[in-house]
Structure formats: structure tokens, C-alpha cells
Amino acid sequence: MMLTLSAGTFISQIRPTVEILRDGDYRYRDSFAIDRPFREIQFRKQDRYITGSDSDKRTGKSYCFRGIPQQNNIINITVAIEISQKTAQKTEWKLAPGNPINFDRLYPLQAGPGLELYKCLTAFLPNLKD
């Protein structure tokens, strides 16, 4: 018995790196299993920046970030930490340096509207005009 792979089969298994993604909204997870805790990253790629939310359902921790894609990593990360919610529409943020994010063990999912992503985009609004 001989197994033959067509070019289409091989190419479909190659995932694009974060750096070559087109501008738009994306969602990645460390697992396809919905019935167990997971880490999920939602982000928007716009021009040379990536802004998003990194949530870990195992620990309950979540944070907003902004950085620059390089191959399958996001580098030069700035983290936005929510320090107080003045009103329902206005939140105060503290910006701090963050660690790079690697996407090698994360799987792309269909992006959907996300409240966390929207919140993170507003955290960096004053800085998006760089």
C-alpha cells in the first residue's frame, strides 16, 4: 500500500505565523476541548500592532496587552492593568512592560465579538495613534 499526499493536503496543515496574518480580529486557544479550563487569546491586528486580551480560565487571570508581531511571537509587550472603574463607561489603566507571547502551542479558532477584546482596545486608545 502506498500513501500519496497531494500538495493541497500538505499546505493545509501549515499554520500561518502571527506576523503574516492580515489586519483583523483573531482568537487562539491552547485546547479545542470546551469542557475543561483553557487559555484564550483574542486580539486585533492593525498595521504593525497587535492589541488583545490574554485570559487563563484555569487561574482566572486576564490581562490586556499591546505589542508587535515577530514570526509566531508578540514582542515589545505593554500590559494594561485595570486599576479602577470610575463609571460604567470609564476605566483607569496602568501601563507596564510585559513578557512576550508565543503562539506555537495555541490553535486558531473562529473570531467572534468579544467583550474582553473591546475592553482591551479601549485601554490602549490614547496610544493607538503612534
Image: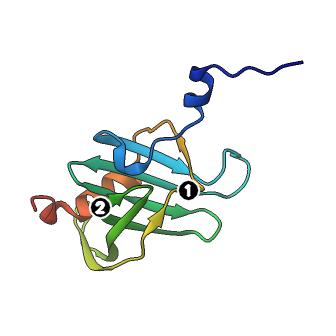
Residue drawn 47% across the image and 46% down it: 27
Give the color scheme: rainbow, by chain, secondary structure or one colour: rainbow
Residue 11 appears in which quarter of the rendering? top right
Which residue in the structure is indicated by mark 2? 68
**Mark 1 burial class by Cα count in 10 Å: few <14, some 14-19, many 20+:** few
- Residue at the extreme left of the image, as rendered: 129
Disc sitting over residue 104 in the figure: 1
Classify mark 2: helix, strand or loop: strand
Q: Residues within 10 Å of mark 2 (few under 14, many from 20)?
A: many
On residue 40, which mark appears?
Answer: none
Residue 81 location, x and y as percent? 34, 76
Q: Is residue 97 left or right of residue 7?
A: left
Depth check, front residue: 92 or 5: 5
Badge 1 or badge 2: first in the primary sequence: 2
Mark 1–mark 2 distance (CA, rounded to whole Å): 16 Å
Judged left or right of residue 111, residue 104 is: right
Residue extending furthest right?
A: 1
Residue 115 visible, this angle: no
Amino acid type for the residue under numbered disc 2: Ile
Q: Type of residue at label 1?
A: Asp
